[in-house]
Image (cartoon, rainbow, N blue to C red):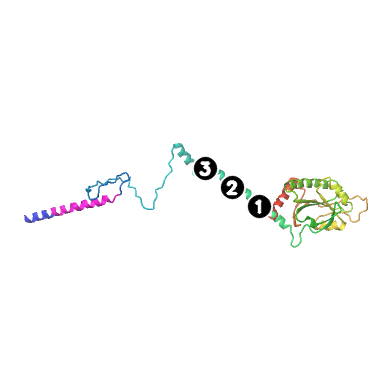
Amino acid sequence: MSRSLTSTRSFMRSLSQARPHQQVCQQLVFSTRPASSSRSVSTTPMSTQKPSLLTPTTHSARSPLPINRPGQYQQRRYKAKTVEEARSRYRTGPFSWKAGVLFVLTGAGLVWYFEAEKKRMQRKRIADATKGVGKPKVGGDFNLVDQEGRPFSSADLKGRHSLVYFGFTHCPDICPEELDKMARMFDIVEAEKPGAVTPIFITCDPGRDDPKVLKSYLAEFHPKFIGLTGTYDDIKEVCKAYRVYFSTPKDVKPGQDYLVDHSIYFYLMDPEGDFVEALGRQHSPEQAAKVILDHLKDWKS
């Protein structure tokens, strides 16, 4: 009987000692929870406050407590105000009509730039291919006489582009047509680039085309045309330098009638006296003027 009383007393004693420990643990657990921002702060000193047991709040598995960890930010999602706004945003996605217009304009600008650069490089290759090593393949030094009877040499063409054409004043049809074309393309170039090109007409028939005849003949086409003539040997040398074919007989009697076969090209020369490009009958005045203007823009660019 004494043994049972002793065990009962020891059990009651251990039970009475365990209750304060459980209360202390509950106070410790609930005191570590952060206070809500809406909860008012008590002004009562901590020594006078009575400890009270807090009933823990139960949370379901579907709504866990939010955990704010240091260094983490909550992602904000876009919330449409109306259903139409939400549908519009879903339909357009991240792009807008402004972005589409900017994309199209940028693409068109790049295409235009690369096409222009491609044409410029082609013109540059043509101009570089016509230049020889040490001596130009087309063109060279010459000393002739202009329609005023004054000496005119290749050095007078330096510093500006020149457009050179070979013909003769007694030509029945080809030369007048080509000189009209030359006058037209020169006016187009002159309107955009005044004084950039010197128009030159070199006769292939020095026996009949003296300075006086040249002056009267060229005045019918353009007042700025410069006509050049010389001796037969001088004309032969300059035609050879420009790779121009002509069939003028050397010893011509006064009053003798004959025709002259010659090449039909306009030779564009740069300010240094080098050959740039030959313009043939396949070019219209507008097309030839555009080619000349393009080469003027490319010069030393």
Q: Which part of the image, by quadrant, shows the C terminus?
A: bottom right
Q: Viewer-proximal residue, 8 or 32?
A: 32
Residue 98 in view in this figure: yes
Q: Secondary structure at mark 1?
A: helix
> In which quarter of the view is residue 142 placed?
bottom right
Residue 203 in view in this figure: no
Residue carrying label 1: 118
Question: Looking at the rendered structure, which numbered label has been put on residue 107?
Answer: 2
Which of labels 1 and 3 is toward the front? 3
Q: Residues within 10 Å of mark 2 (few under 14, many from 20)?
A: few
Kindly report the secondary structure that dominates the magenta region of the rendered protein.
helix
Start and end of the magenta stretch?
A: 11-33
Q: Which part of the image, by quadrant, shows the N terminus?
A: bottom left
Q: Viewer-proximal residue, 92 or 13?
A: 13
Between the residue at mark 2 and the residue at mark 1, the CA separation in whole angstroms equals 16 Å
Left/right placement of residue 130 relative to residue 170 reads: left
Between the residue at mark 1 and the residue at mark 3, the CA separation in whole angstroms equals 33 Å
Q: Secondary structure at mark 3?
A: loop
Residue contact at pointers 1 and 3, CB within 8 angstroms: no
Residue carrying label 3: 96
Query: Residue sitting at 59 percent across and 47 percent down?
Result: 107
Left/right placement of residue 125 relative to residue 13 reads: right
Whichever of labels 3 and 2 marks the residue nearer the N terminus, that label is: 3
> Looking at the picture, which amino acid does disc 1 mark?
Lys
Q: Secondary structure at mark 2?
A: helix
Q: Position of residue 290 (x, y in %)?
A: 72, 48
> In which quarter of the view is residue 141 placed?
bottom right
Q: Please say whether residue 21 is one of the residues in the magenta stretch.
A: yes
Between the residue at mark 3 and the residue at mark 2, the CA separation in whole angstroms equals 17 Å
Q: Residues within 10 Å of mark 1 (few under 14, many from 20)?
A: few
Q: Viewer-proximal residue, 137 or 80?
A: 80
> Looking at the picture, which amino acid does disc 2 mark?
Gly
